[in-house]
Image: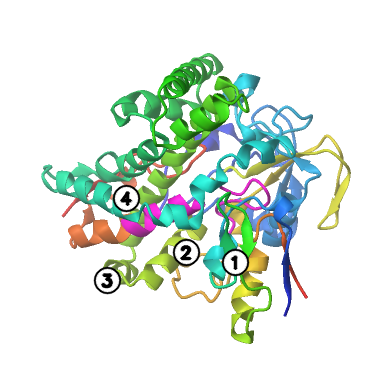
């Protein structure tokens, strides 16, 4: 399967310099073939970014884990050499950055205020709520005429409603925050537009935190306002930055895993049937395998070296950028047998779809729960679900920080 | 097999609880809690997976 790809136009004309990154995909279900070639030949090599900088791209599974676990590689986007995702990312205000772009000890200070909200046990308690949201969305979808867009009817609203309930953000405002999230996650967004989205979301969340401070509610932002902002442990701005990170990360990633994962399952009917049967161990394995195979965070995890570090036979110098390509690591044949196949029966599946190191996804128990509920519920409610357009008509999110499919017209 | 954990460096990702729920738990702050520092041999595979999956590498095995 081939598709037109906006990334392709970013390729540099000269053949001598390092290859441009991100690279174009030949097949929308597989990472760029160039990544596999680099992983086999020069697993740590330079690539050229949109701004002309040439950070190191790390493609092997073990090296990606080593980089992400090594504190000498900084997550601070303002450190010299940090590889910027886009011009839009560069203009973000420093005071709206959250702990995802900070190093320890500051990162740990903020993260520790949130981890109690995302424990395995606490998230498991949300299962009935997530199942109820899925049920209501699927019943509403059944009442629609076909074809209908699965992204709009189910994949996006499910995690969006769930994160809103968890945070205490009014879902009625979803058009507002979904539009601004989308603008911030699009690498082709103009800097002035990104700045506007940044400012709008900041203002919205600061105002929400202020309301919760005055009248705390029994939700994450309410607890943060009451226990941290009122006590002076956090400023309103800091709490808002944390809330914004959770809001944006909480719906875009899972939404695209539901959309792209469903598309993948529909092209693997035998595996889809196993998910539909709903045996929990099979569903859990299916979710892990889809996370590995699809790796929707497909522009790598980015760091800046703060010291000279020798890794995989290469010395990365202080001040140089590093991109740990999880999307390549998750297809490394040295770690995963037949890495390009969808296989629910892998003995181990220690993928890095949620990253690795101290920044590993805080919300991963929630993402897992949502996917474990979403796939079987959808396939059971619509046993004859099918894609309603030819594969060539689908538009993939090549320009978005979170990969997936823009719309998925389905019938049943 | 003897297990130890470094709670000061824990990031609360919960990988250990998912891998070996009879050996690891999370306390009310979300940090790792070792509920069985000397688990039976049949838990070894799960515990090794937990140690390998721990993103902050705070689980040590002896």
- Residue at the image point whose x is 81% and y is 44% from the top: A72
- Residue at the image point whose x is 56% and y is 72% from the top: A348
Sequence order check, earlier mark of 4 and 2: 4
Q: Nearer the viewer, mark 4 or mark 3?
A: 4
In the rendered image, residue B1, in percent from the top left (x then y), is placed at 72, 80
Inter-mark Cα distance, 3 to 2: 17 Å
User: Which residue is tagged 1?
Assistant: B24
User: Which residue is tagged 2?
Assistant: A289
User: Which residue is tagged 4?
Assistant: A130
Mark 4, chain letter?
A
User: Which residue is tagged 3?
Assistant: A277
* Count of numbered tags: 4
Q: Nearer the viewer, mark 1 or mark 2?
A: 1
Residue A257 vs residue A141: left or right? right
Q: Are marks 3 and 1 on the same chain?
A: no
Q: Which residues are magenta?
A: A351-373
- The answer to whether residue A4 is visible is no
Sequence order check, earlier mark of 3 and 2: 3
In the rendered image, residue A404, in percent from the top left (x then y), is placed at 42, 45
Q: Nearer the viewer, mark 4 or mark 1?
A: 1
Secondary element at image label 2: helix
On screen, residue B48 above or below A99: below
4 and 3 marks in contact (CB < 8 Å): no
């Amino acid at each position: 399967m081939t598709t037109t790809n906006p990334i392709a136009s970013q390729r540099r004309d000269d053949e001598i310099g390092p290859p441009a990154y991100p690279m174009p995909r030949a097949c929308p279900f597989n990472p760029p073939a160039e990544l596999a070639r680099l992983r086999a030949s020069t697993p740590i090599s330079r690539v050229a970014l949109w701004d002309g900088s040439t950070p190191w791209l790390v493609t092997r599974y073990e090296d990606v884990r080593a980089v992400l676990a090594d504190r000498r590689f900084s997550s601070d986007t303002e450190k010299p050499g940090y590889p910027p995702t886009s011009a839009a990312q560069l203009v973000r205000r420093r005071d709206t950055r959250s702990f995802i772009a900070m190093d320890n000890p500051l990162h740990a200070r903020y993260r520790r205020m949130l981890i109690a909200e995302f424990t395995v046990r606490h998230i498991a308690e949300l299962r009935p709520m997530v199942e109820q949201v899925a049920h209501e969305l699927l019943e509403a979808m059944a009442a629609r005429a076909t074809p209908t867009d699965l992204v709009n009817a189910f994949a996006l609203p499910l995690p969006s409603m769930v994160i809103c309930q968890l945070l205490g953000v009014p879902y009625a405002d979803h058009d507002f925050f979904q539009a601004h999230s989308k603008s911030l996650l699009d690498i082709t967004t103009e800097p002035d537009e990104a700045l506007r989205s940044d400012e709008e979301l900041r203002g919205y969340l600061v105002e929400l935190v202020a309301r919760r401070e005055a009248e705390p509610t029994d939700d994450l932002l309410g607890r943060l306002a009451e226990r941290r902002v009122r006590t002076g442990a956090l400023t309103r701005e800091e709490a808002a930055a944390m809330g914004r990170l959770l809001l944006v990360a909480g719906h875009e990633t899972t939404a695209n895993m539901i959309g792209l994962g469903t598309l993948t399952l529909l092209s693997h009917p035998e595996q889809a049937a196993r998910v539909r049967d709903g045996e929990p161990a099979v569903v859990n394995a299916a979710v892990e395998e889809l996370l590995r195979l699809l790796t929707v965070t497909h522009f790598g995890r980015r760091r800046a070296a703060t010291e000279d570090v020798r890794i995989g036979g290469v010395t990365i110098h202080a001040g140089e950028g590093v991109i740990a390509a999880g999307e390549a690591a998750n297809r490394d044949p040295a770690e995963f047998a037949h890495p390009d196949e969808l296989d629910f029966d892998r003995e181990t599946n220690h993928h890095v779809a949620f990253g690795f190191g101290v920044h590993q996804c805080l919300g991963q128990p929630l993402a897992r729960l949502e996917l474990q509920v979403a796939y079987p519920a959808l396939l059971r409610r619509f046993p004859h679900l099918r894609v309603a357009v030819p594969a060539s008509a689908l538009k993939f999110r090549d320009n978005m920080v979170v990969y997936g499919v823009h719309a998925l017209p389905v019938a049943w | 097999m003897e297990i130890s954990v470094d709670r000061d460096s824990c990031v609360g990702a919960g990988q250990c609880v998912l891998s070996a729920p009879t050996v690891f738990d999370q306390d009310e702050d979300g940090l790792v809690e070792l509920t069985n520092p000397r688990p039976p041999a049949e838990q070894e595979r799960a515990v090794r997976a937990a140690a390998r999956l721990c993103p902050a590498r705070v689980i040590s095995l002896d």
